Image: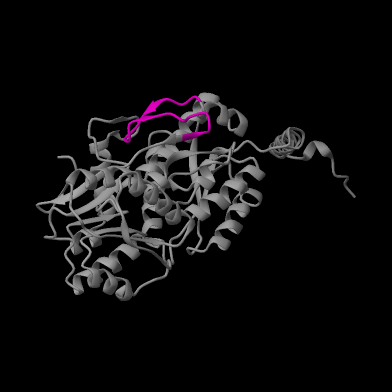
Amino acid sequence: MKLMRYNHIPKINIISYILFFLSFFTVFFSGKIVSKEIKIGTSIPLTGQFSNIGKYYHDAYKFTIDKINESGGVKVNNSFKKLSLKLYDNQSNIGINKCQYIKLITEDNINFLLGPFLNNFILNNSFISEKYKTIIMQSCGISNQILSNNFKYVFGLFIPAKNYFQDTIEILKKMKIKNEKIVFLYVNDAFHSAIANGVSLIFKKFNLNKIINKNYSLNTIDFTSLIAQIKNINAKIIFFSGYETNIINFIRQIKIFKIKPMFFSLTSDLLNKNIRNLLKNENNYTYGITPWLPNFNFKDRWFSNAKNFSNEYKKKFGYYPDYHSIFAVIDIESLVYAIEKSNDLNPLKVKKQLKKLNFNSIYGKITFNKNNKMIISQNVIKIQNNKLVPANS
């Protein structure tokens, strides 16, 4: 009988064993695996009542991440890492959304979070990011509930809800319309209620009186009872605060009732093709608001400039970007700049660099205040000769 000798074991196997044990002990004693990618996670509505706006964020997030990865990725410690996106559909449900954000942190082990856009969702997720000390980039209009909280891990571009109609009402006041009745309608959620409170204060400041001031349910489809009241008092000035679906349903129904306002103001940037089609030939009295007006002179590291970005985006998705798309881009670019400046994925180091950011983008100059926010204002736009123009033009 022949004995098996150790010197008969192929050398290649010995080398493999050595490499395996070296890698095992490296991971074991360091306590972590060095990843070749930077994991970003988010939960947005791809189905349900908010899926229209959810699509804008979905498209812009993926578009931006693909662009950065195509350019080489993110430079950390003299090497380049790719961005990866873990994205869940929260079905427009706040409870599902909350569970998904916790899962992104505790199970998917993401490095950073991107936020949703709805006020109640934003507030929930801000508390989650604080609890788990995970940076979240949030962007959209917000109520004072979020602005007043001193969240340490929440960054983003924000439009205070109370200021939404400030400039629009100033335009109305300058028009000096005599003795006209004013109607203000709004969704009865936290965000639009905050808008309504702000509107009441501005109306009071300008000595303007609302004749009808009513809220409606988020799920309202039939506005006929409210529209009948508008028709009965022959109101010619209408402010309507709601989401895209609410706005579309309301416009369709006032057209059926043949109501022709002298001044019609919406919480919309009027870029949505469905809204624009409904308002075709309704010239010179419809006003919208947007925090972003395309300025093709704005330069950007990855997209060259705002014009190039808009054209590339339109070519890929079949529609031009609106401010939701722009905010999504800024969220990701801000993270990348801060990661590269900190030369690390440690949230404390990245957070420190986010506070110091100062860079050019398709939106313009990006910096955050001491509360981690960039407060931005609205631009009033209107339809004139079937084109969108700044309201003061």
Instruction: Write the residue at 34% across / 33% down.
Output: 302
How was this image coloured?
Answer: one colour
Instruction: Write the residue at 18% across / 53% down.
Output: 178
For the question of whether residue 50 can be seen, the reply is yes
Q: Please give the range of residues in magenta.
A: 356-373
Instruction: Answer left or right for 374 relative to 40.
Output: left
Q: Nearer the viewer, residue 341 or 192?
A: 192
For the question of whether residue 76 can be seen, the reply is no
Residue 211 drawn in magenta: no
Residue 367 drawn in magenta: yes
**Would you place residue 310 above or below residue 299 in this image?**
below
**Would you place residue 175 above or below residue 353 in this image?**
below
Q: Nearer the viewer, residue 393 or 38?
A: 393
Q: Quadrant of residue 97?
A: bottom right
Percent position of residue 7, x then y: 80, 36
Magenta: predominant secondary structure element?
loop
Instruction: Answer left or right for 347 relative to 195.
Output: right
Q: Nearer the viewer, residue 360 or 158?
A: 158
> Which quadrant of the rendered structure holds the C terminus?
top left
Instruction: Answer left or right for 168 relative to 118.
Output: left
Percent position of residue 339, x then y: 52, 30
